[in-house]
Amino acid sequence: EMPNMALDGLFVALLLSFGTTVALDPIPRITWEPRDVHLVRFQEPGVSNYSALLLGSGDDTLYIGAREAIFAVNSLNIADKQHEVRWRVTEDKKAKCAEKGKSKETECLNYIRVLQFLNSTVLYVCGTNAFQPTCDHLLLKTFELVGKNEDGKGRCPFDPAQSYTSVMVDGELYSGTSYNFLGSEPIISRNSPQSPLRTEYAIPWLNEPSFVYADVIRKNPNGTDGEDDKIYFFFTEVSVEYEFFGKSMIPRIARVCKGDQGGLRTLQKKWTSFLKARLACSLLENNSLFNVINDVFILRAPDLKEPVFYAVFTPQWNNVGLSAVCAYNMSLVEDVFSKGKYMQSATVEQSHTKWVRYSGEVPKPRPGACINNEAKAANYSSSLNLPDKTLQFVKDHPLMDDSVVPISNRPRLIKRDVNYTQIVVDRIQALDKTVYDVMFISTDRGALHKAVSADSGMHIIEETQLFPGSEPVQTLLLSAEPGKKYIYAGSNAGVVQAPVAFCEKHRTCVDCVLARDPYCAWSPRKASCVDIFKERGSISSLIQKMSGDASSCTDDQGRENTLRHFFKHGGTAELKCSQKSNLARVVWKFQNSVLEVQSPKYLLIFPHCLYYLLSGYNYLPYLFQLYLFLLWLCQIS
Ligand SMILES: *[C@@H]1O[C@H](CO)[C@@H](O)[C@H](O)[C@H]1NC(C)=O
Ligand SMILES: *[C@@H]1O[C@H](CO)[C@@H](O)[C@H](O)[C@H]1NC(C)=O
Ligand SMILES: *[C@@H]1O[C@H](CO)[C@@H](O)[C@H](O)[C@H]1NC(C)=O
Ligand SMILES: *[C@@H]1O[C@H](CO)[C@@H](O)[C@H](O)[C@H]1NC(C)=O
Ligand SMILES: *[C@@H]1O[C@H](CO)[C@@H](O)[C@H](O)[C@H]1NC(C)=O
Ligand SMILES: *[C@@H]1O[C@H](CO)[C@@H](O)[C@H](O)[C@H]1NC(C)=O
Ligand SMILES: *[C@@H]1O[C@H](CO)[C@@H](O)[C@H](O)[C@H]1NC(C)=O
């Protein structure tokens, strides 16, 4: 029975102190659950698999390709649907597909896989169409499909479970996918009426690839060497050069030249410029190798001399959940292809075919090179003029011996207990003029991590739960327009729009500064944490310290925040630390000494004494006089 004596009120002070954590496996500082933040969602009843996202250019439209449907929504508020068109499989196609042993409910449907601008008025769309891939034109004015019924073989996979990637370059679609019903014939192709090209169907060219990304890198407009635009493909494939136990996977970057016309006899209607190399991303000290590439983002910015690309990796056997981000420099990629050594297959004993460095003579012009001024000067005005020797060499040696290594030779970020799926990067300038590449990385459990490289190492500013925890994020887009910056994430369940920062959620100056979020700063005038890119007027009074040093927050009530808790007689009280930071430490103090208890959660209040209820079994009585003072230190960082 509770003794009945008055306990007028227990004054609990919440003291904030400071500190920074340096971590190799950084913990997101803040975790936002869907109820904490405002996210906009798009989900259409009866429609699933929102796998293709495309941002309109300058008209605030987001195009969404889903299963049997294409939508146009307002990119500033994706819940605002503007248009939709259904693209269903006909009954006889569905029946034929089912006859071949595929599921009517899941496989014999039309999954939109290609969604690209053909020009400013037409979208080029392709779908799996019950294992009969088909492409069509979508007129943006009326949002109607023309009904072209183009054969989508080589542009779009037959099987919705197969990997695919594509990019539209000057009205011609470049794609990486599979070419047959079984999905056993991989292909990288260009769909062009003038000069369609494709890869050889041969293991050294593509060996069970899983495509993740493709994009064009334009030539330097001021270049004097007459180089060409190049299209890069990223994929994971089965290694031909290493053999461990069973199949070992290897991440690749491959490239072709836009001006390629194929060969005249050798490599007729095939790429003469197809070369590929290994993408290295490993932490040598720990011998952990990230050999499955999941996504790529190519970062271009006016202040960057050359594009830098970011890629997310996981290990092949990933039961622990380990992920890495590596960043690469485009000039290094170019060097590997234009100056590197080639590999060649060598039959060694026991008929194991291994690939080794080729050190013989290399024919001229250099195999796989684009037609540049030097080639033209030697009268090779097009790939059709290339000598057979060069073509035969590239046909047999598409693989480079040198690997593409990441900037600083190590991953930017390594994270445990997570499988990263997609990445986008925003390059911004903080108030102190330092430029930050802010990485937004999604997981296979519906979350988004926002990470930035700080002096003390990688700092994960926050983790936002976009979808329920079972939903992998499959597509991620960044709209980088000033004032309209948003992240768009697609999954099987729907599409989510999230702002790039949740500055206003940081309630105090200390919290705002400790977030170390380059988008956010404390405005003493407004007494709120603001987005520096949305702030009009003077920004000179704003407080932002990417080091996390909050000592400028002097006048702010948030520096030494005091909370008062009043307790009822004889009751149980839960003291909640209102601190959102996962990096915070909670300690109890009694007469200036720290109580040796592990994060007490509950307090039993009796006259003269307090009981801490610990995890289940053990409770320590501490005798208190009524006037004694209990401090709860919530140390945040
Ligand atoms: C866009 O492409 C379509 C199909 O090729 C063509 O009919 C149309 O004229 C083009 N529009 C513009 C503005 O180029
Ligand atoms: C489509 O979405 C459903 C869940 O809504 C999922 O079970 C299925 O695997 C998805 N199919 C493809 C091909 O992504
Ligand atoms: C090309 O030259 C122009 C004029 O000299 C310059 O403004 C521009 O930045 C250069 N572009 C590149 C990519 O070097
Ligand atoms: C590398 O190994 C060392 C020693 O085992 C360990 O302390 C460190 O955390 C490891 N690094 C990573 C990224 O796993
Ligand atoms: C790319 O790498 C080269 C060689 O390491 C270096 O000279 C160049 O500055 C790098 N560029 C960037 C943007 O890091
Ligand atoms: C290129 O062709 C032109 C005209 O056919 C010829 O005059 C010239 O000598 C050739 N140059 C080379 C390097 O073969
Ligand atoms: C990561 O993926 C692997 C393989 O699919 C799975 O076994 C593991 O549970 C995943 N881990 C996390 C943390 O999602």
Image (spheres, rainbow, N blue to C red):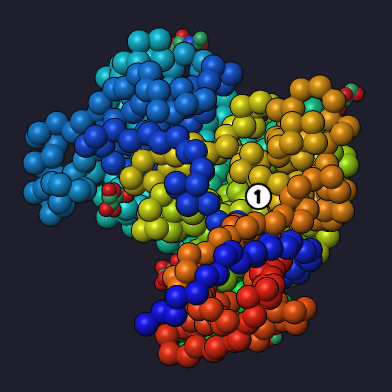
Q: Does label 1 point to a residue whose CB lies under 8 Å from ligand 5? A: no
Residue 315, image x and y in percent? Answer: 53, 71
Q: Is residue 120 above or below residue 634?
A: above
Q: Is residue 558 above or below residue 537?
A: below
SS at circle 1 = strand
What residue is shown at x 52% (from left), y 25% (from top)?
Answer: 76
Q: Is residue 397 above or below residue 610?
A: above
Q: Is residue 303 above or below residue 311?
A: above
What residue is shown at x 43% (from left), y 42% (from top)?
Answer: 490
Left or right placement of residue 393 versus residue 518 in this view = left
Quarter of the picture containing the N terminus is: bottom left
Residue 79, image x and y in percent? Answer: 40, 28
Residue closest to the eye, 546 or 420: 546
Left or right placement of residue 97 versus residue 61 in this view = left
Residue 438, image x and y in percent? Answer: 69, 47
Which image quadrant for residue 594?
bottom right
| Count of marks overlaid on the render | 1
Crowding at dot 1, Cα within 10 Å, few <14 / some 14-19 / many 20+, comes out as: many
What residue is shown at x 58% (from left), y 77% (from top)?
Answer: 599
Quarter of the picture containing the C terminus is: bottom right
Residue closest to the eye, 578 or 25: 578
What residue is shown at x 79% (from left), y 27% (from top)?
Answer: 221
Report if residue 70 is visible in the image: yes
- Residue where numbered disc 1 is placed: 439
Left or right placement of residue 418 versus residue 179 in this view = right
Residue at far top of view: 141
Left or right placement of residue 75 versus residue 69 in this view = right
Residue closest to the eye, 24 or 9: 9
Please state which amino acid type lies under the numbered disc 1: Met
Which image quadrant for residue 449?
bottom right
